Image (cartoon, coloured by chain):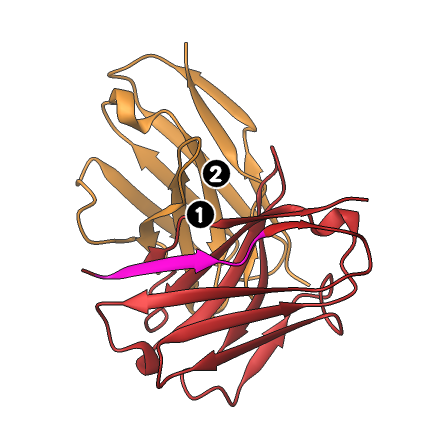
Amino acid sequence: QVQLVESGGGVVQPGRSLRLSCAAYGFTFRSSLMHWVRQAPGKGLEWITVISGDGNSIHYADSVKGRFTISRDNSRNILNLQMNSLRAEDTALYFCARDPNLEGFDVWGRGTMVTVSS
Amino acid sequence: EIVLTQSPDTLSLSPGERATLSCRASQSVSGNYLAWYKQKPGQAPRLLIYRASSRATGIPDRVSGSGSGTDFTLTINRLEPEDFAVYYCQQYGSPWRFGQGTKVEIK
C-alpha cells in the first residue's frame, strides 16, 4: 500500500531546532520528487521545499530558506526536514507529499504538528 | 513570482447543484501544470485534477477541470455530501504555489 508517514513534530521554543521525518512505503521512493507542505492552524496550504529523486536538486520557499534543510535517504526510504531557528510563524501541520512526474502531489501523509512557543 | 487567486472565497450550494470554482494566475502557468486538491477538516489534501484537466485516479467524472494560460476552472456537477470541503489550486513543476482556497459549504 502506497503510504507516507510523518513523525518528529512537537512543541519547541523559538530559536530552537526540530527534525521531521517522513517514511515512505509501497513505491519506488528514489524515483519520486518529494515535497514538504505546511498548513498553519485555520489557514491554507504553503509549499515549503522539494528534493529530487537523487537528492541533487533542492528548492526552498523564501519563508524557510537558510533555516530549513531537506534531505533524503533512499536506502531507507526516508525524507527529512531539519528546521533551525524556529519562529512562532512556523507553527503548522507539516505534510510530506509525493510528486511522481509532473502529475501533481498524488500521495500525502497525514501530517505532523509543530508548535513553536515559549 | 506567480500568485494564484481563487474565487469565490466561499461558495454556498445545495446537494445536487453544480459548483464552479475559479483560479486565476498572475502569469501564464507553464505547461498548464495546474492541479486541484480537495481537503476536508482533519484530513490531508487529495489530488483531484492535474495538468489542468486530467482526473487523478479514482476521481469521478462529475469532477472536471478546464482552462489554460492564466484562467482555470474546477467544476463539480451534482454535489454530493462528501464534496463540501475546501478546494485549492496549485501551480507545480517549479515554482510550486497554492491558491488561498475556496470553501464549498452547504447552503
Disc 1, SS: strand
Pointers 1 and 2 in contact (CB under 8 A)?
yes
Q: Which residue is mark 2?
A: B22
Q: Colour of chain B?
A: orange
Chain letter corresponding to the colour red: A
Q: Chain of mark 2?
A: B
Disc 2, SS: strand
Q: Is residue A80 above or below residue B7?
A: below
Q: Position of residue B65 (x, y in %)?
A: 33, 46
Q: Is residue A106 above or below residue A80?
A: above
Q: Position of residue B60 (x, y in %)?
A: 17, 40
Q: Quadrant of residue B1?
A: bottom right
Magenta-tinted stretch:
A2-9
Tell whether B39 sits left or right of A42: left
Q: Position of residue B19 (x, y in %)?
A: 36, 27
Give B31 or A85, whichever is nearer the viewer.
Answer: A85
Q: Chain of mark 1?
A: B
Q: Which residue is drawn at the image coordinates 62% and 46% (left, top)? A: A92
Residue B46: in sight, yes or no?
yes
Which amino acid lies under the numbered mark 1 shown in the image of this protein? Phe
Give B41 or B92, whichever is nearer the viewer.
Answer: B41
Q: Residue B72 bears which disc, if any?
A: 1
